[in-house]
Structures are given as structure tokens and as C-alpha cells.
Amino acid sequence: MQLGTRWNVGGAVPDRLAPPVVLAIRDVESQLAEVDTSQWRWTLTWLEGRPVVELDDGTVIRVDAAGGVHVTFDGAEDDHF
């Protein structure tokens, strides 16, 4: 695993993330509109060359070997982009 970077919810997403991952991040953020996320951050790491993006609340966005983007909330997969 390789550590990438951290950024604030709603902040600029790292340039090296593919558009489908950015779309998933923005979708998750839009679902949090009623929540105070002012202290929350995203953490980007790389596992086997693919991004893993985790929000402080435990939401995880992963890219599978076929390039599919999956979002999990509390350990249960919810969305596929």
C-alpha cells in the first residue's frame, strides 16, 4: 500500500484520480449536505496500483481490477459507478 494524500470534504480532488472516482467522491459528498463535515477529510492510498479513497466516517471508494468503482458505507456496498 502506498500513501497518497488527504484533503477536506468539498476540496480539490487530486489530479491523478480518474473521472469515475471523482464522480463517486462528489456523489458521496452530495449525500452529506445536511451533515457538518467541516472537520472531515478524505484519505487517498494506493493498493496494487489502484486508488482507495476513505472518508473519516468509514465510507470507502475502491476501483476493482476491471476498473469498476465501488462505494461502501459501513462495510456494505451501496453504489457502483
Image (cartoon, rainbow, N blue to C red):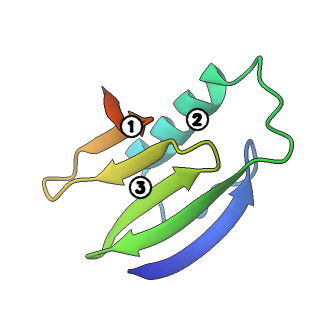
The answer to whether the residue labelled 2 contacts the one labelled 3, judged by CB atoms less than 8 Å apart, is: no
Counting labels gives 3
Residue 19 vs residue 65, the one in the foreground: 65
Residue carrying label 1: 72
Q: Could you say where residue 4 lies in the image, as x and y percent from the top left?
A: 55, 76
The residue shown at (73%, 45%) is: 9
Q: CA distance from mark 1 to mark 3?
A: 18 Å
Whether residue 80 is visible: no
Does 50 sit left or right of 67 as displayed? right
The residue shown at (60%, 63%) is: 14
Q: Could you say where residue 12 lies in the image, as x and y percent from the top left?
A: 72, 54
Residue 34 vs residue 80, the one in the foreground: 34
Callout in the foreground (1, 3)? 1
Residue carrying label 2: 26
Quick one: label 2 or label 3, which is nearer the N terminus? 3
Residue carrying label 3: 18
Q: Return the residue found at the far left.
A: 66
The residue shown at (15%, 59%) is: 65
Which residue type carries mark 1? Answer: Thr
Callout in the foreground (2, 3)? 2
Q: Could you say where residue 52 lies in the image, as x and y percent from the top left?
A: 41, 60
Callout in the foreground (1, 2)? 1
Does 68 sit left or right of 15 as displayed? left
Mark 2: give few (<14), some (14-19) or many (20+) Cα within 10 Å.
some
Q: Return the residue found at the far bottom.
A: 2
Which residue type carries mark 3? Answer: Ala
Circle 3: element type: loop
Q: CA distance from mark 1 to mark 2?
A: 14 Å
For residue 35, above or below residue 56: above
Q: CA distance from mark 2 to mark 3?
A: 13 Å
Quick one: label 1 or label 3, which is nearer the N terminus? 3
